[in-house]
Amino acid sequence: MLPASFFRVFRQLTIAFAACALFLAASGPAALADVCKPWQSQTDSYCVDKDGLQTRELGYAPQEGERCWERSRTTCKCESGQSAEGETCGSCETVGTESVDIVCLPY
C-alpha cells in the first residue's frame, strides 16, 4: 500500500499539470508556434513583416546596405480530417519545401 504522502504529491502534480495545460490552451497557437523570422517583428502575438521589407526574385544578390533572406514554403499532404498548422504541416505529412522569393531589409 502506498503512503498518503504519495497521493498528496500525485494530486499536486496533477493540479500543476492541468494548470499548465489550461495556460497553454488560453495562450493560443501564437504563443506556442510563432517564432518570428528575422524580417518580422511580433505585434499583438502575431508575426508581421517589418517596415521597409522588399520582395525580390530568386537569385537576387544583396546590395550594399541591405540584408536578405530566402523565403520558402512547405508543401503538406493531409488526409481527411487533418489540417496543416501555420507554417508547419502539423499532423499532416511534409512533402517538401520550395524556395519562393527573397526578402530584403535595409540596415
Image (cartoon, grey):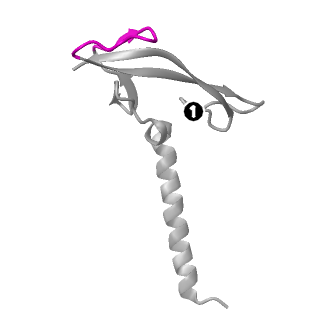
Question: What x and y, as percent, mark residue 96?
Answer: 63, 27
Kind of residue indicated by mark 1 = Thr
Q: Percent position (x, y) of residue 77?
A: 71, 27
The residue that label 1 is drawn on is 88
Question: Which residue is pictured at 44% across the width and 8% down the height?
Answer: 57
Quarter containing the N terminus: bottom right
In the picture provided, is 7 more to the left or to the right than 103?
right
Question: Which image quadrant for residue 79?
Answer: top right
Q: Quadrant of residue 43?
A: top left
What is the residue that sits farthest to the right in this orientation?
Answer: 80
- For the record, the magenta segment spans 52-65
- Tell me: 68 left or right of 83: left
Q: Secondary structure at mark 1?
A: loop
Residue at x 58% of width, y 80% of height: 7
Residue 2 lies in the magenta-colored region:
no
User: At which x and y percent is residue 6?
Assistant: 56, 83
- Magenta part mainly helix, strand or loop? loop
Q: Residue at x 50, y 38 (%)?
A: 29
* Res 98 quadrant in image: top right
